[in-house]
Image (cartoon, grey):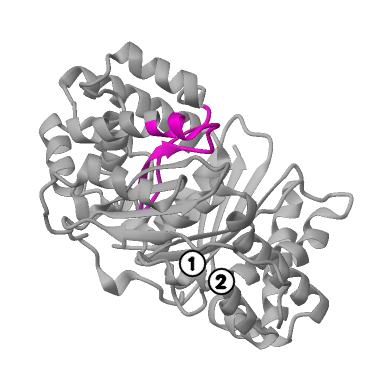
Amino acid sequence: MRLESIGMDKPVSFGTLPNGLRYYGRFDRVANAGGIGMKFGSMHAPGGKCGLPHFVEHLLSRSASKYSDEETNLILRRYLGGPDSDINVRIDRHSTFYGHLMLLKPSHMRKCFDLFAHMLKDRIVDVQDLEIERSRIQNEHCLRGVDIMDELLWETLHEMAYRNNPARYRVDCLPNELASISLSEVRAFIRKNCVPRNIFIVVLGPRFKVAERMACEYFQDWPDQPVPELDYDLSDGYAPLKEPVVRVISRSGISQDHVMIGFPVEEFGGKNHYGLRVLVHILEHLLYTPLQEHSRGVYRNPILLSQSKFHGLLTVNFATVHPDFVEPGIVSVSDLCRRLRESLVDPNVFNATVHRTFYEWVGPFVNDANELLELIIDSAANGDEDLMLLHAGRAELEKVTRRTIMNLANQFLTPEFLKVHIKPA
């Protein structure tokens, strides 16, 4: 189908230093967003050390020899509002990032970049830092990873989906494994993974030559070292389930039943990369009425796509104060999947959802540097280093047809799915 004549304007440019570090840039008069990315996340934890990459993310963002601790805190406060605001230091399954969202001036971005670059270069980690951040991560694990039901559903489903694939590791930690991590193990992980071929920088706003100069200024003196290999079992990637997999968890102190249904899908960058994104919007649209538009309806039913170059999961979740709606809600999802397998989706729904997906692709290039930053991070960390797939969004979406969606439903939205149900004790 033909999409609207909305242009992406300039593509994202990139270059590579002799030591292998990749840098990305795109001119934008108002963006001033960026930072430093690492091609490691929770999936890169050594066996028995779930939480080690998260630990490193915390520890490396504490100090730099160029700045006192007070100066560091004031820079973060002045430009980013502090660690709970526009700061963009975080980790996911496949990447770690030290940066920020859109700032007001290029000089502000340069100051923040200087701070983060020195943090990563100095790698100041001591025993006191270790214990402070260990405590913070333990609290973060409870606050966000255990007490927020959506996060607990999300992490539990990833654990259920795989036997050996490191996508099964929690992003935050397992408390008993976090407690066993030593200072020497932290330093060894940093030495192995914080190497130029495992690092990239993104500078959105100034002209590309500025990104090139920043890469040279801060990183050209880093020695070239090989990309660290992930201990990954290739046999545990995408594979259709042979039977439904169910887990029920009883929790005291909650007021709703929480449900997440998951379907294994292909990894990031597969041949159905954009088709799966259209499928997400079709599910969102067609599940709205059966799950929300009635007297016992739920408040939201988000559809999420979790992918890296090593794993893929499509999930549907909802929460309800009516325990007797749990099974009908699951049946609604299952019935919709069956209909999508058996017949072509309504053409009006198809057209609307393809255009929605196109908006989500082209919009970041037009007026959302924050989202474009995230798209670049995902691409750089998951094998699309030259951004060929990212830039091909329009052409790839125009190839998607109603038959494509039917084929995807038959391949991925099978009756054998993953289910987590957290119910009040």
Task: Using the rendered view, name the quadrant where residue 402 is placed.
Answer: bottom right
Does any portion of residue 72 appear in the rendered image?
yes
User: In this figure, which residue is indicated by the disc labeled 1?
Assistant: 390
Is 88 colored magenta in this rendering? yes
Which amino acid, mark 1? Leu
Quarter of the figure with the N terminus: bottom right
- Please, what is the three-letter code of the amino acid marked with disc 2? Gly
Horizontal side of 375 relative to 198 (left or right) equals right
The kind of secondary structure element at disc 2 is helix
- Work out whether residue 400 or residue 66 is closer to the camera in this orientation and state it: 66
Residue that lies at the very extreme toward the right in this rendered image: 295
Whole-percent x and y of residue 202? 39, 48
x%, y% of residue 200? 31, 51
Q: Residue drawn at (28%, 35%), measured in percent from left and top?
A: 117
Q: Position of residue 188 (x, y in %)?
A: 12, 41
Residue 393: image tag: 2
Any magenta on residue 149?
no
422 with respect to 380 (left or right): right
Number of residues whose C-alpha sits closer than 10 Å to that of mark 1, classed few (under 14), some (14–19) or many (20 or more): many
